[in-house]
Image (cartoon, rainbow, N blue to C red):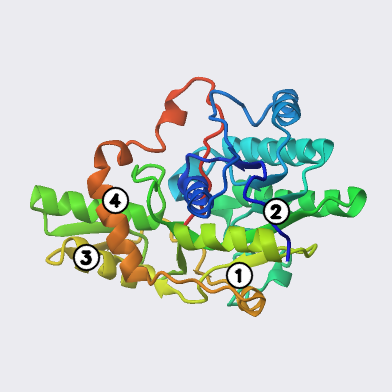
Amino acid sequence: MHELRRDARIYIAGHTGLVGSATRRRLEAEGFTELLVATRDQLDLRDQAAVNYWFRAHRPEYVFLIAGTVGGIVANSTRPAEFIYDNLMIHGTVVHAAHLVGVKKLLYLGSSCIYPRECPQPMREEYLLTGALEPTNEPYALAKIAGIKLCQAYRRQYGCNFISAIPTNLYGPNDNFDLTSSHVLPALIRKFHEARQSGRDEVVIWGTGTPRREFLHVDDLADASVYLMRNWEADGHINVGTGEDLSIRELAELVRDIVHPSARLVFDPSKPDGMPRKLLDVSRLHALGWRHRIPLREGIVSSYQWFIANRATARGQGSRARRRPNPGPPDVETVER
């Protein structure tokens, strides 16, 4: 077990996003006092010289590498260059700077889209690079795979204690509810909410409703991340999820029952489904001693409550970077549908 002192200098790269904010809450709740953060305006993580300077100035001992450019099917399809460039650069600069200043341990968070489109289910860690990727998010997936291999390369060449974890689809407080860039669960919450508010009894769902997805509450991922920082030392990556999935239709029905029970679902098969199924094999994580705690229905209820309380800002999340002529890297890290 790797001991984490309460006064250790811990850098959370991507602290304002879905996962980063949850990780910060988790560490603060446990009493860590030296949490290091930088907004995208303070530090462009795509700039190696700037990142090197920041690391030399702040000397982090531990790093949670969560930052990245992310989004759902629409964002992946319309902004592929941003997705591959931003993420390749962010992963590269932070990992290299962590090596240069002698960071004691770094946890890199990937995405379940790294596995092949036709991957056997559930997806085991060793299935990486055994087949073609899902075309709708290939640039993003390639960048995330590169991040994993980057950590492995620095571990093997320099002896760096850099580890990688692959979370499943995430949701929770501080999610992105912008319909042009969000993932399926927050998009459904907003669609059903707005239908109820406007008195509409019909909600259109993208695709056929048949793909199956696994969902993990972001607070569970934050707990798992701290657990892995203490307990995972291996060269290969490790999956983080629930080991349970459901169809998009079942998910839509669950959100409907919570948000707008009288609504009728209408599926639009002209829209892409994405991968047929993405269920992670989490037997390695379970053997290590960690399991998720938040049931899906309970998590959706709390996410909807958060959306209601923060809807003025939640609706616009994810749009700022697209409006800026030279956007810095969004500091949010989730996974696509």
The residue indicated by pointer 2 is 145
Q: Secondary structure at mark 1?
A: loop
Which residue sits at x=32%, y=70%? 297
Residue located beneath label 1 in the image: 118
Q: Secondary structure at mark 4?
A: helix
- Label 4 or label 3, whichever lies nearer to me, is 4
Label 3 crowd bin: few (<14), some (14–19), many (20+), radius 10 Å: some
Say if mark 4 contacts mark 1, CB within 8 Å. Answer: no
Q: Which residue is mark 4?
A: 306
Position above or below: 116 against 150: below
- Dot 2 or dot 3: first in sequence order is 2
- Residue at 59% across, 65% down: 117
Whole-number angstrom distance, CA of label 2 to CA of label 1? 17 Å
Residue type at numbered disc 2: Ile
Q: Residues within 10 Å of mark 4 (few under 14, many from 20)?
A: some
What residue occupies the far left of the structure in this picture? 199
Element at label 2: helix
In space, the residues marked 2 and 3 are separated at their CA atoms by 36 Å
Amino acid type, mark 4: Trp
- Disc nearest the viewer among 4 and 1: 4
